[in-house]
Amino acid sequence: MAPDLMKSLLILPTLAATASGATLVDWTFTGLANPAHGGSNTNVPAGNVIASSSFATTAAGVSAGNIAAGTNGTYSNDIQWSNGNSLASGELNLQNWDLTGSAGTSGGLGGTGDSTPDFWLQFAINADPGQTIELTGISMSAWRNGTGAPEFYRWYYSTNGGTNWLTFGSLYTEDTAGTGSPFETSNYTGTVSASSLLLRFAPTGGSGNIHINDIVLTGNVVPEPTSTLLGALGILGLLRRRR
């Protein structure tokens, strides 16, 4: 009986990992105040918070950090909250993603950029102790505001605090633009398991506005293999003592 029980306990993580992904984190920006609305654009230096973690709803066993601005340091400008075509609240309306011009300058707005990400959004998700996050999908609702806005969307992840980055899913091309275009949902699929992940959205192909109103991460939260094995051995020990 004990070996059969041991076998059953050890396959539980596999069953959990292959179950259909649930919502891990849902970033909904309803109520988020755009500081640029009604005035000039607002710079957000690298490392500064763009949206606090209070706008993220997380599943049990998962926590999310603030969304912060990031840059490769090529230009002297910053990512900006844009005043153009902006709602008062409920979306991230940002520009300066992929600047044109010469390195070390403020960079020009519009155009196709140089296909190297100059600015990005970045945040962390963490599992509770003894748990592992299995990220399987990212979806994002966004509006590309005009032909000068980036049209190539890419997500990256790091499992070692940002030392190394890998792409998550495929490059997404947004081929609609303009003030009359509706929000489009882009989807990215992959598989990565870690207790802590850094995620980065870095579009290219222009420096104009992208409006983002929702980001959803899907996957599973499962016990770490070591924790599961220790739990199984503990149960077997109790059974043996009872026998």
Image (cartoon, grey):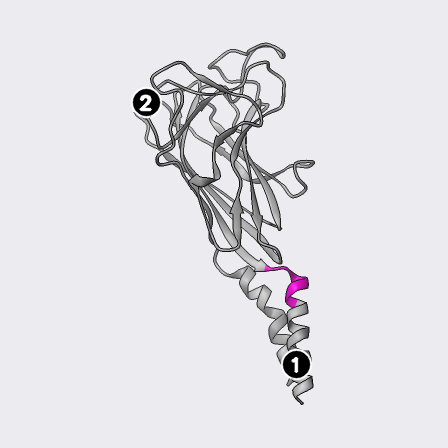
Residue 226 percent coordinates (x, y): 68, 63
* Residue at x-position 54% and y-position 39%: 170
Q: Quadrant of residue 114?
A: top right
SS under mark 2: loop
The dominant secondary structure in magenta is: helix
Q: Is residue 125 depicted above or below 81 in this figure?
A: below
**56 displayed left or right of 124:** left
Residue 121 percent coordinates (x, y): 53, 31
Residue 25 percent coordinates (x, y): 47, 46
Region in magenta? 223-228
**Mark 2: which amino acid?**
Thr
In-front residue for pair 74/205: 74
* Residue at x-position 45% and y-position 24%: 94
Q: Residues within 10 Å of mark 1 (few under 14, many from 20)?
A: few
**118 displayed left or right of 138:** right
Q: Which residue is mark 1?
A: 238
**Mark 1: which amino acid?**
Leu
